[in-house]
Image (tube, grey):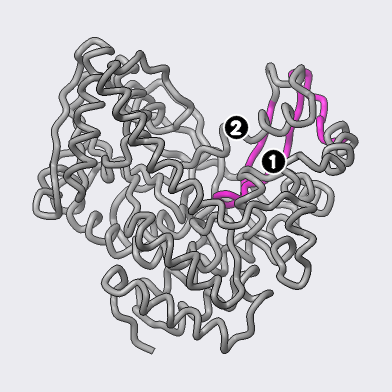
């Protein structure tokens, strides 16, 4: 079996996913093909992963492929392809995503999923995924593409609608959603045996049901405890708890992400909201700088001290592969096309996040039915942007980029149309060759 990792220079993440595979009997003898366009980062990954492989029993084989000219060989005959690329990296592209909008008074926290940052990230990534898909259709047409790259719904939605490649989008937030909420509210005793239902879109999937092991609805007690947490000036997860107050449900992704997915919390005319909700502006650039510096130190320590044992993580990738290979079913929260209206009050062309069964037949999404109308409405404010961004990438029309930015809830609530268009033009110019050319 062959497992190809695209963007293997993302060493920490590659280590988690491939380490998980090496901890899994059905997967550990695989060929692990590492692909990247950065030779130095690829070499670091090879060094660390071979050391990990030896620490875990010497199973499998690591192969490295550098640059576009070796991409088809990396993909050839792959059974699974894991995608964790970042086109344009922190420098220059993430810096551009934050600094250009800031000149127009538009502030962001993460900028990788929605908002003007998410739009630009999608536009520079979709052309690369288009090339991946063309190569896969030629050399591994039956492989399953496991996408971890953000903006998840835009990239997975593009792959699902416009390529012939089987694709599922995977995130980290579904697995920890209810656990995070219960721990935050001091309800750890309700964790064992709990039952839950999560559905919506990536980073805004709704915790629709949460019950204890005996089937008792936990939302009444959750709602009773929310005001005390909201009153704590040091508590960091206030946006999501505010969702419970105003929309009735908690959602999957963190408050720093969700602060910029709507028109409510980051507002230049209401600067006091930043402090009230503990919103960390420019958070993602800070993380990037810290991660870059942290990895240099960690890599030096790993080379000097050796790689320790790996404990299988909560990432879905190895569990999906294991279920498909062994036939022992598993359940995940997957990002799939809303074909057949899995969520009946969201459009079919949307990429939705729903429970999925996994077995030898692959990813089998479950029908959820309608979301509460207010939750569907919140999701639609994001889906509008996602669909228009995909349309811009497919048609090459700049007008669709303008429209995506205009309809983005945060951008549209802060800037007028003329300013939005000027900002988009500046962003396109600043990205240079990282973006294709657009017609009007």
Which residue lies at the image location 46% right of the left edge and 56% below the top edge?
Answer: 151
Q: CA distance from mark 1 to mark 2?
A: 11 Å
Tell me the residue that label 1 is attached to: 207
Which residue lies at the image location 72% right of the left edge and 27% below the top edge?
Answer: 183
Give percent across and percent down for residue 298: 36, 29
* Quarter occupied by residue 322: top left
Say whether residue 368 is left or right of residue 124. right
**Numbered disc 2: secondary structure:** helix
* Mark 1 or mark 2, whichever is nearer to me: 2
Say whether residue 303 is left or right of residue 331. left
Which residue lies at the image location 29% right of the left edge and 68% below the top edge?
Answer: 434
Give percent across and percent down for residue 123: 38, 67
Give percent across and percent down for residue 405: 54, 75
**Numbered disc 1: secondary structure:** strand
Tell me the residue that label 2 is attached to: 176
Give percent across and percent down for residue 353: 54, 47
């Amino acid at each position: 079996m062959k497992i190809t990792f695209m963007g293997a220079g993302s060493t920490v993440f590659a280590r988690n996913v491939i380490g998980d595979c090496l901890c899994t009997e059905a997967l550990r003898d695989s060929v692990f093909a590492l692909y990247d366009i950065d030779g130095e980062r690829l070499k670091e990954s090879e060094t660390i992963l071979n050391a990990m492989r030896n620490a875990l029993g010497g199973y499998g084989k690591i192969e490295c492929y550098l640059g576009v000219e070796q991409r088809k060989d990396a993909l050839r005959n792959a059974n699974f392809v894991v995608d964790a690329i970042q086109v344009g990296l922190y420098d220059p592209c993430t810096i551009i995503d934050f600094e250009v909008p800031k000149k127009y008074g538009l502030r962001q926290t993460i900028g990788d999923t929605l908002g003007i940052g998410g739009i630009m990230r999608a536009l520079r990534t979709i052309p690369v995924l288009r090339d991946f898909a063309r190569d896969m259709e030629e050399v591994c047409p039956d492989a399953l593409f496991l996408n971890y790259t953000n903006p998840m719904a835009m990239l997975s939605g593009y792959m699902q609608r416009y390529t012939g490649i089987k694709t599922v989008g995977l995130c980290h937030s579904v697995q920890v959603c209810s656990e995070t909420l219960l721990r935050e509210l001091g309800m750890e005793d309700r964790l064992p045996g709990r039952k839950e239902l999560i559905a919506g879109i990536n980073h805004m999937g709704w915790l629709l049901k949460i019950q204890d092991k005996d089937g008792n609805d936990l939302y009444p007690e959750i709602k009773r405890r929310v005001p005390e947490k909201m009153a704590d000036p040091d508590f960091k997860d206030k946006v999501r708890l505010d969702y419970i107050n105003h929309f009735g449900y908690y959602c999957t992704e963190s408050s720093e992400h969700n602060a910029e997915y709507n028109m409510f919390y980051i507002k230049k005319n209401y600067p006091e909201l930043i402090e009230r909700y503990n919103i960390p502006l420019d958070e993602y650039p800070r993380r990037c700088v810290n991660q870059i510096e942290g990895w240099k130190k960690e890599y030096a320590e790993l080379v000097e001290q050796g790689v320790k044992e790996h404990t299988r993580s909560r990432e879905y990738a190895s569990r999906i592969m294991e279920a498909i290979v062994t036939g022992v079913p598993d359940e995940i929260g997957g990002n799939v096309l809303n074909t057949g209206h899995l969520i009946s009050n969201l459009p079919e062309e949307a990429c939705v996040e729903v429970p999925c069964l996994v077995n030898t037949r692959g990813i089998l999404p479950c029908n959820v039915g309608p979301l509460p109308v207010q939750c569907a409405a919140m999701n639609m404010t994001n889906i509008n942007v996602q669909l228009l961004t995909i349309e811009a990438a497919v048609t090459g029309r700049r007008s669709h980029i303008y429209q995506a930015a205009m309809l983005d809830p945060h951008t549209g609530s802060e800037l007028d149309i003329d300013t939005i268009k000027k900002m988009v033009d500046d962003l396109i110019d600043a990205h240079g060759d990282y973006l294709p050319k657009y017609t009007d």
